[in-house]
Amino acid sequence: MTDHPLRKVADTLIAATNAGDVDAVVALFTPDAVIDDPSTGHRLDGHAGIRTYVERYFVGYHTITRFLSIGSLPDGRARVRVDFTGDFGHEIGLLDLTVDADRRITRIDANLE
């Protein structure tokens, strides 16, 4: 589904992480945003936590993310299915996105399939 209301948010996030542009990634999030990623064993809070997460798991592992699909979740959220490759190998992941009225990310619940 390419016309999902949060597809542009997902595409922008993927492009910024693939470019290794940590500042651009952080700018997509609200200051109090959360990334909860049980696959890494971490919950990261706020811009500082998100910066650390992107530097460690995307830049540090040379991660490239490829969009696979997007679907709707309750309360206007979206589940984005992605393909991750990098120094760690290959994984399929799920990113449950929550955004505010300005389309800034307030929360990502990440997991692996």
Image (spheres, rainbow, N blue to C red):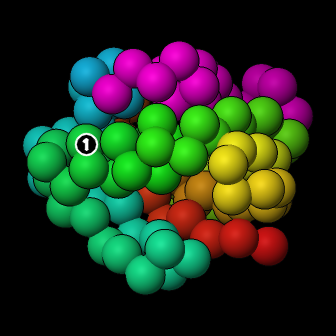
Name the spot of residue 59 as percent of width and height, x first.
Answer: 46, 36
**Residue nearer the viewer, 90 or 93:** 90
Identify which residue is drawn at 59% across, 37% down. 62
Which is more toward the observer, 60 or 100? Answer: 60
Is 78 on the left or on the right of 23, as rendered?
right
Q: Against 113, is 30 above or below? A: above
Residue 10 visible in the shown view? no
Residue 36 percent location from the top left of the image: 40, 70
Magenta part of the chain: 1-22
Give the left or right position of residue 48, taking residue 24 as reference.
left
Would residue 7 be visible to someone looking at this image?
Answer: yes
- Corner quadrant of residue 29: top left
Q: Residue at x 62, y 71 (%)?
A: 111
* Amino acid, disc 1: Arg
| As drawn, 20 above or below 91 | above
Q: Position of residue 1 (x, y in %)?
A: 87, 34
Residue plotted at (79% across, 73% down): 113
Using the image, determine if residue 102 lies above or below residue 49: above
Instruction: Using residue 69 as the reference point, say whether residue 31 is left or right of it.
Output: left
Identify the secondary structure beneath mark 1: helix
Q: Residue at x 60, y 56 (%)?
A: 95
Which residue is identified by label 1?
51
Q: Is residue 80 left or right of residue 57?
A: right
Mark 1: few/some/many CA within 10 Å (<14, 14-19, 20+):
some
14 inside magenta stretch: yes
Of all residues shown, which one is farthest toward the front? 87
